[in-house]
Image (spheres, helix red, strand yellow):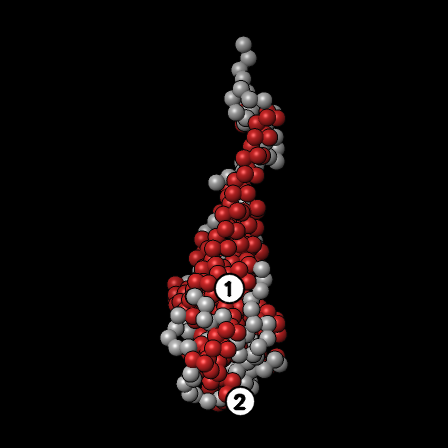
Amino acid sequence: MSTPMPDAVLVPHGEGHDGGLSSEVGGGAPGAPPASSRAEDARRRRWVLARRVAGRVLGAIFVLWAAASFTFFVQTLLPGSRATLLLNESSGQQKNYTAAELAPINHEYGFSKPVLTQYVDYIGGLVHGNFGTSYEQHQPVLSIISREVGPTLVLTLTSLLLAWVMALLFTIATAKRGRVVSAIGSGLEIVTAGLPYYWLGVILLVVFAIDLDVFPVQGGTSLSGLVLPALTLGIPLAGFIGQVTRDEFEKVLEQPFVTSARARGMGDLEVRLRHVLRHAVLPAITLSGWALGALISGAVIVETVFARPGIGQVIVTAAESRDVPLVSGVVMLVATVYVVANLLVDIAYTLIDPRLRAR
């Protein structure tokens, strides 16, 4: 009687251990035909992937609903009459009005309706893509946001690029360079990651715009006016990305394939750039979705500090006048960018990493 060959011998070259077909004889369920086993495995993987994607989509919808609801109730339930505030804004005077004087405004904007009815109308409008009309500017909210969002997106993307460049250069230069250098690098990343946007922006403004007169005091749409706001947003993010990248970078430096590359005569910088960096940045890439949403939120503060055009000035003015549709529209924009970016990153990793599809 011949000895049966083990399954491992029957695995064709090139098939991985990530759930792919192992052989025509082995690797399937005992007693099940190989083709049936493969089809069942494929169906199971598609179901797991669809379930994960559906879960992420539902989570994103919940976050958007929560953001919209929170913004609505905070603005609506604040003490004081919104109709009075609108009349004072339009007249430029601060005074009290009679009920008869307030009645047309309450009727026009629906302020006299119960709060729950206003909320249902508001959510229904969002579902149908109607963000309403600004109480103060008397224009559709979407047109106001689309007009002002361009400078904010430029600032956000520039800050993200600067943060990545600063984080990677600093990590490559200081990681595993000796106890003192590594400690200095890690310490600076911790400090910069905790810097408040408002404080850092004021410091940069005073030093480089007022004292040294290198950059303009008011950040316009020019390239020179973009530098200080972008650094204000990028430096804290660079510290955060640097912390995540450094931890993984130092782990990868200890891997056997790095030792093998050094043994083949490859220089330290080449090893770091060609072999270590591409593995070390993967955890930080997963944070890019969160970073994009955080940068747009921070841009609201930075644009106010540097008097830069964008949605920052819009939301500050709208919040002061309790312009619920406009405030809600900006908040929904930030929340949408955040959840969509995170959703795309998560789905991409689910598609790339077979281990996630099997869970």
In the picture, the quarter occupied by the N terminus is top right
Give the class, few, some or many, for how many residues have Cα within 10 Å of label 1's Cα (few <14, many ≥20): many
Q: Which image quadrant for residue 214?
A: bottom right
Report x, y in % for residue 303: 52, 78
Q: Nearer the viewer, mark 1 or mark 2?
A: 1
Label drawn at residue 213: 2
> Which residue appears at 49% of the width and 70% of the height?
110
In this picture, residue 92 sits left or right of residue 42: left
On screen, 24 above or below 282? above
| Amino acid residing under circle 2 | Asp
Q: Which residue is mark 1?
A: 122
Query: In this view of the protein, which residue sits in the foreground, 107 or 314?
Result: 107
Residue 216 location in percent, x, y?
Answer: 56, 86
Residue at 50% x, 68% y is 328
Specify which label sits upstream in the sequence, 1 or 2: 1
Q: Position of residue 180 (x, y in %)?
A: 39, 66
User: Is 143 in front, or is 290?
Assistant: 143
**Residue 285 showing in the rendered view:** no
